[in-house]
């Protein structure tokens, strides 16, 4: 026991001063720093999530293109616009990637004596979904010739950015 603190009142004041905690200004500084970190981190995180979902859309397109080629090889050189013929339930458009993208009905050109049959398949984000905010890679397309293209929300070619 401290010889200078021999009264009960003086001893209790010492405890109160030692457990004062944070001042309001210190707390506000911490809140401001945390707010800045959240303001930077959340948009970056959402961008990376959208970027990851792009991969799922491209994978679904390439899978559908492979199904078209399989159908073509077993049906006398004809591509199809019927989802069931490609192993999907329901009809086009087909929703893929947990509802993030829709794949439109393939554009099919029948073959002739002078031209080969072709197809083109396009995936776009579902409107109103978070993925629709991905304006850099607003659509992905695969063709029977193996071309893989992408466009941003303005219709500009972003293939080098989105298909790498």
Image (tube, rainbow, N blue to C red):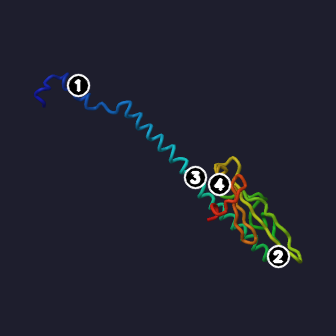
Pointer 1 residue: 13
Query: Crowding at label 2, few (<14), some or many (≥20) Cα neighbours within 10 Å?
Result: some
- Left or right relative to 102: residue 2: left
Pointer 4 residue: 136
On-image quarter of the N terminus: top left
- Identify which residue, 116 or 62, lies in the foreground: 116
Residues at marks 1 and 3, CA–CA distance in whole angstroms: 54 Å
Q: Which mark is residue 47?
A: 3
Q: Determine the image quadrant of residue 19.
A: top left
Pointer 2 residue: 77
Measuring 15% from the left and 22% from the top, which residue is drawn there?
7
Q: Determine the image quadrant of residue 20.
A: top left
Number of numbered labels in the structure image:
4
Query: Crowding at label 1, few (<14), some or many (≥20) Cα neighbours within 10 Å?
Result: few
- Identify which residue, 76 or 120, lies in the foreground: 120
- Identify which residue, 30 or 150, lies in the foreground: 150
């Amino acid at each position: 026991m401290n010889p200078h603190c021999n009264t009960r009142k003086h001893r209790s004041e010492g405890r109160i001063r030692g457990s004062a905690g944070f001042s309001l200004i210190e707390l506000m500084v911490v809140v401001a720093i945390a707010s800045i970190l959240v303001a930077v981190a959340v948009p970056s995180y959402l961008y990376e999530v959208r970027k990851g979902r792009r991969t799922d859309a491209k994978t679904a397109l390439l899978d559908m293109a492979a199904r078209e080629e399989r159908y073509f090889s077993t049906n006398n050189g004809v591509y199809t616009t019927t989802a069931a013929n490609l192993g999907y339930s329901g009809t086009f458009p087909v929703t893929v990637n947990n509802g993030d993208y829709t794949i439109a009905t393939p554009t099919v050109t029948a073959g002739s004596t002078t031209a080969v049959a072709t197809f083109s398949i396009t995936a776009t984000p579902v409107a109103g979904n978070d993925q629709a905010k991905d304006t850099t890679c607003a659509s992905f397309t695969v063709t029977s010739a193996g071309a893989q293209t992408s466009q941003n929300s303005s219709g500009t070619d972003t293939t080098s950015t989105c298909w790498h």
